[in-house]
Amino acid sequence: MPASTPLRSLPGRVRRKIRYELGLPPHLRAVRRAEGLTSLHEAAMLYDLARNVSDGCIVEVGSYRGRSSVALGLGSLSGHKVDVFAIEPHEPFTSLGGGRQFGPEDRAAFFRAMTRTGAYKVVHLVNLPSTQAAAGWTRPIGLVFIDGDHSYDAVKSDLDSWEPHVVSGGIVVLDDVTEPDGGPHLVIERALRPAGYRPLREVGKVAAFRKP
């Protein structure tokens, strides 16, 4: 749109979209341009949590096309600039119920999101399955966001693989926690709460817990 084009001359739908974009803080405008399944409200929470991580790195299990990775990366850049590791094999995979297909084409979208937003400055893609990446892991983790396969066994496996590396007082975040019979919700009830994890924040379908 030319800089001289009056806003009032544009169609109403376009005007509303522009006003909405201008009303967003810069980091959420960047997040909105990245593809993914994370809402802007959820991304804002991830951004805030990442901004406060100073002890240990950030690990994200399941990055898809990079929207949540952008939120975590920009949050880190606005805070203590800790490394963010995106654990995502980008191999062919069908979500529970067959509703969504994932695969190598998502890798290109991920890289586009990193370069367009500047999140690449702290975000490192680890193109390996979660448990494989965790097998040789040695770095302390200040925040882990688990958003891979949402079956109970897969979520529990991801938690068991990464939680031992989370520092005391660190944060475990899970996606899709609202389904009572879903893997993330069951892991919260069967593993996190019994271990003394304290609820920290919940926005949309994403919930954060503090390690005791």
Image: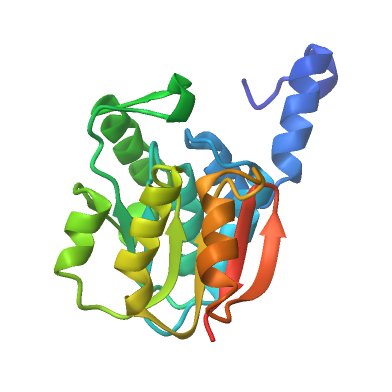
The residue under the point 22% across, 64% down is 134
Quarter of the image where one finds residue 149 = top left
Residue 204 at x, y = what percent?
Answer: 70, 48
Q: Quadrant of residue 208?
A: bottom right
Asked if residue 32 can be seen in this view, the reply is yes
Q: Residue at x 35, y 58 (%)?
A: 158
Instruction: Indicate how the structure is coloured in the image.
Output: rainbow
| Quarter of the image with the C terminus in it | bottom right
Q: Residue at x 38, y 45 (%)?
A: 63
Residue sitting farthest toward the left: 136
Indicate the quadrant containing the N terminus: top left, top right, bottom left or bottom right: top right
Residue 103 is left or right of residue 113, and the answer is: left
The residue located at (51%, 48%) in the rendering is 183
Q: Is 178 displayed left or right of 136 in the figure? A: right
Q: Is residue 178 above or below residue 17?
A: below
> Of residues 38 and 195, which is closer to you in this image?
195
Left or right side of 152 for 52: right
Q: Is residue 88 above or below residue 6?
A: below
Nearest the eye: 44 or 20: 44
Q: Is residue 57 visible?
A: no
Marker count (numbered): 0
Of residues 184 and 166, the one nearer the viewer is 184
Residue 173 in the image, given as x and y percentages of width and height: 53, 62
